[in-house]
Image (cartoon, grey):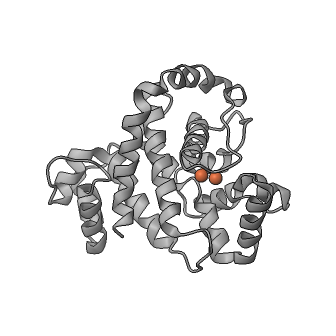
């Protein structure tokens, strides 16, 4: 319903209100620094009018994904706060890249960034031994998560995540961008947003000081290469503000 701009707001409110805890949490989320609004929002209708369907969809997907993917296992060197900080960092970065390049809708890009690594949570919950082995490999070889998965000949989190997205019947754009967010070469049916997620993921990983990441713009899909190179050229002008926006947005999750 949120994907269809023709959906009347009354219908949306009626459906969402069947789940009071969802309503409360949407309001809590939209009032948090996550969305950076100046005035308080106290009704669902107001939230939808103010934020638009795209943002409310982001909020609903965010809340549902968090609910569904609570970590069952604790790992040394990996905690859920770090995981969500990364996800939000990539979401905010992605929204910015989409906004500036006009290669995708800003809110779609935000949601795509937010869920890009959901496959990792499946790994932690269902294949903890495999996950431990990947973490170990990252340490010993000083490589990225994706490279470690490949070195171990393991099913990558991109594939696991896109499988999950398909089963949950999430929009195809999300499924495809989860699937393609580490691939340099994109298939014809890969949406531009996947390329944005890839760039945002590398930039945020570099920001977080992780080893093995580097951005080689020559490997970007042709459609996004030129606008991306132009945008990165003046990154000194926008990066500091974006960085503080990311820090601000992650506060919501650090508060629990
Ligand atoms: Fe990833
Ligand atoms: Fe990532």
- The answer, for residue 1, to whether it is visible in the render is no
The residue closer to the viewer here, 18 or 214, is 214
User: Observer-nearest residue: 203 or 172?
Assistant: 203
Seen in the image, is 148 located left or right of residue 48? right
Q: Which of 6 and 215 lies nearest the eye of the viewer? A: 215
The number of numbered discs placed on residues in the rendered structure image is 0
Can residue 46 be seen at all in this image of the molecule?
A: yes
Q: Would you say 17 lies left or right of 41 here? A: right
Picture quadrant where residue 99 is located? top left
Which residue corresponds to the image point at 20% horizontal and 59% vertical from the top-left?
A: 44
Q: Quadrant of residue 226?
A: top right
> Where is residue 134 drawn, in percent x and y?
75, 65
- Which is more toward the observer, 16 or 256? 256
Query: In this image, 22 relative to 127: left or right?
Result: left
Name which residue lies at 59% across and 44% down.
206
Where is residue 218, by image quadrant?
Answer: top right
Q: Is residue 11 left or right of residue 71?
A: left
Quarter containing the C terminus: bottom left
Q: Residue at x 73, y 53 (%)?
A: 146
**Residue 216 % position (x, y):** 69, 31
**Residue name at image x 50 percent, y 74 percent:** 70
* Residue 139, horizontal then vertical, whole percent: 74, 61
């Amino acid at each position: 319903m949120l994907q269809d701009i023709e959906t009347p707001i009354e219908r949306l409110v009626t459906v969402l209100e069947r789940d009071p805890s969802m309503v409360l949490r949407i309001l809590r989320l939209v009032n948090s620094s996550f969305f950076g609004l100046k005035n308080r929002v106290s009704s669902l209708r107001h939230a939808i009018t103010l934020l638009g369907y795209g943002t409310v969809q982001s909020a609903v997907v965010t809340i549902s994904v968090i609910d569904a993917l609570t970590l069952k296992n604790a790992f040394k060197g990996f905690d859920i706060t770090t995981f969500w900080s990364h996800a939000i960092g990539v979401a905010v970065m992605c929204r910015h890249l989409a906004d500036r390049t006009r290669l995708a809708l800003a809110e779609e890009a935000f949601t795509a960034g937010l869920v890009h690594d959901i496959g990792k949570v499946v790994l932690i919950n269902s294949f903890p031994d495999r996950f431990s082995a990947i973490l170990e490999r990252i340490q010993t070889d000083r490589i990225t998560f994706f490279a470690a998965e490949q070195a171990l000949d393991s099913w990558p989190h991109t594939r696991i995540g896109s499988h999950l997205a398909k089963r949950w019947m999430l929009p195809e754009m999300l499924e495809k961008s989860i699937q393609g967010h580490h691939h340099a070469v994109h298939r014809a049916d890969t949406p531009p947003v996947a390329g944005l997620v890839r760039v945002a993921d590398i930039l945020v990983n570099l920001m977080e000081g992780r080893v093995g990441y580097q951005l080689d713009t020559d490997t970007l899909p042709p459609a996004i290469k030129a606008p991306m190179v132009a945008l990165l050229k003046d990154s000194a002008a926008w990066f500091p503000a974006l960085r503080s926006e990311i820090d601000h947005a992650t506060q919501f999750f650090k508060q629990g």
